Amino acid sequence: MKTITIDPITRLEGHGKISIFLDTKGDVENAYLQIPELRGFERFSQGRRAEDMPQITSRICGVCPVAHHFAATKALDDAFNVEPPSPAKKLRELMYCGYIIYDHILHFYYLGGPDFVVGPDAPPAKRNILGVIEKAGLEIGKEVIKHRAYGQKITGILGGKATHPVCGLPGGVSKGLNKDEVKDIETMTKSCVEFAKFSLKLFDDIVLKNKNYVDLILSDPYTLKTYNMGLVDKNNKLNLYDGKIRVTDQKGKEHVKFDVKDYYKNIAEHVEEWSYIKFTYLKDIGWKGFKDGKESGIYRVGPLGRLNAAEGMATPLADKEYKRFYETLGGKAVNSTLAFHWARLIELLYATERAMELIKDPEITSTKIRNPVGEPGEGFGVVEAARGTLIHHYKLDKNGLIDKANLIVATTNNAGAINMSIRDAAKGVIKKGKVNDGLLNMVEMAFRAYDPCFACATHTLPGGMPLEVSIYDKNKKLYKSVKRNI
Amino acid sequence: MKTIVLGVGNPILRDDGVGIHVVNQLKKQINDPSVTIDEAQTGGMNLLDMIRGYDKAILIDTIKIKHAQPGEVKRFLLSDFSSVHSYNPHDVTLPEALQLAEKLGEGRIPHEIVVIGIVLEEMPLEFGEQLSSTIAAAVPKAVEMVLFELGKNLNISSQSNDKVNMKISLR
């Protein structure tokens, strides 16, 4: 058996490693992505003041601080037995929209999009934001920068700080909006709605009108028939900030819908000896290995998971796009991994439209933004992080200190599916021991679609996302290696 | 001339947060309206937003390089890093962000971006606020190098020679 190792795919050498195992014929048998799981969070949080959790957890990850901030804040609402007043909920959701706006723009234009806009066959040095600008034009580059910054500014106005918000408190928020701020946010949001529409048109022109790209999206190596998970409102429309967790099957039918309080009755974790990460799966279906289909409990979260888990979008323009998405890609559920990118843009449009509704809501300037807390107990919080369902669960002691804390983060929910997508992409480019030059690109496209966040929050220089493929023969002797940025 | 000094890192991820420990020391020693001292628990595009509008930026961060001992403190210019591909699956690198800003005609970019890098032993994977003894021992040296960089160290005779030599050896 040959082993191919792609090492590493994250920022630091030695972390995040893809190993591809070949069978005797030299075809891909299995592929494993090893990602470092940050450890010791429960011990770290034990004995701390519960109300510090929104600040502490927002530092777990440099990528989704706002998602952690609100998952924690919502868990505290529950733990202190308090319902925030309606204006507070709206302020939180508006801020959440700001976060989704900047996060989704960043991913589409800077990270995932280059694969399409510049092209999957383009050299890696061109497959970045600079390549996108070269192809799409300088003016578009300026618009990208501007609207990503708007998302950040909206988040900053509401959160106190753009990156690490300080507004979430059990029972509400610490800060409301004045009329000037409302005006600013409204102007920026209006522009963001137009930019989201433009982005969908760009996707249409560059990707959907190109048969090769559509074929690639619909191709077998990028198809995975898993269950899907996401938050929905009472009408089963997609929601990012609140609602029930809905799981649908491979054909888009509801499998189960539950309150976050019941997450441990529905979600279980599987451990593999080669990985730090725990693979979540649907408890009632069970863990059947890295397989898709109705018999396997693996599910997907994130933009595609959410669209599949819902029955539509709660805003008009996004809902129109939602319908077009399913019409174009062959009905429910869409199981094409690369459709994550389109789904992400539909969510971007939704977030901008929803932000517009909220900023125009008369309650948004209300000063009734906090309710008094009750006695400390146990609490559950859930939000849809940009990259998928995020759950916080705390147990507080009688003094309001953290006794137990458990988090299920988005990338954990997608870990099983990401492994399979990497395996299937590798299958397409490795035949009879022959490794196609496109291996790095194809594998990278497979995991990038999910917008995963691996071991978060370090900022260690030097940069350069290194990729290395090492191929070993039966006797584990190195026989070939492909490298980039090493 | 306006300068910003940023400690880059995660304060709850042990040695990764050393840059923040360094700026906490600097805050006690520097009181100059032309110098802004802050922490940046972020990277890429957000970092670019933070350094915009300054003439000079000094970033204090962890580094992992070959042929260096953990706890060593090195000075680089950001231009020494030429990478254009993201090292984080969800952000661009600062050099990439800067190239982008340049391409789009964004002024207000610092003329000089200096990185004071503290060599890590390994990437921490366990949450905690304490530094390891090796990395904690590097904090005074990093503080001193930032002060020198700011031209504020009045007692530089012996130290400065080291710095100059080091700069040369890095080129």
Image (cartoon, coloured by chain):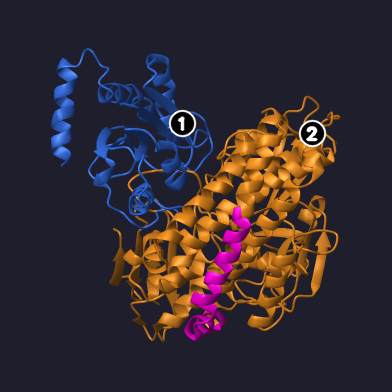
Chain colours: A orange, B blue
Give the quadrant of the C terminus of chain B.
top left
Whether labels 1 and 2 belong to a single chain: the reply is: no
Between A406 and B85, the one nearer to me in the picture: B85
Q: In the rendered view, would you say A348 is above or below A24? A: above
Q: In the rendered view, would you say B69 is above or below B103? A: above
Magenta residues, dominant SS class: helix
Asked whether residue A271 appears in the rendered view, the answer is no
What subunit carries mark 1? B
Q: Residues within 10 Å of mark 1 (few under 14, many from 20)?
A: many
Residue depth check, mark 1 versus mark 2: number of the one nearer the observer: 2
Q: Residues within 10 Å of mark 2 (few under 14, many from 20)?
A: many
**A34 inside magenta stretch:** no
**In the displayed structure, does residue A439 sit left or right of residue A43?**
left
Give the residue at mark 1.
Answer: B39
Give percent across and percent down for residue B27: 42, 19
Give percent across and percent down for residue A145: 47, 52
Asked if marks 1 and 2 touch (Cβ < 8 Å), the reply is no
Q: What stretch is highlighted in magenta?
A: A191-219
**A199 inside magenta stretch:** yes
Give the residue at mark 2.
Answer: A369
**In the displayed structure, does residue A398 sit left or right of residue B156?**
right
Which picture quadrant has residue A465? bottom left
Between A63 and A26, the one nearer to me in the picture: A63
What subunit carries mark 2? A
Q: Which amino acid does label 2 sit on?
A: Ile
Going by the picture, which residue comes out furthest to the top? B155
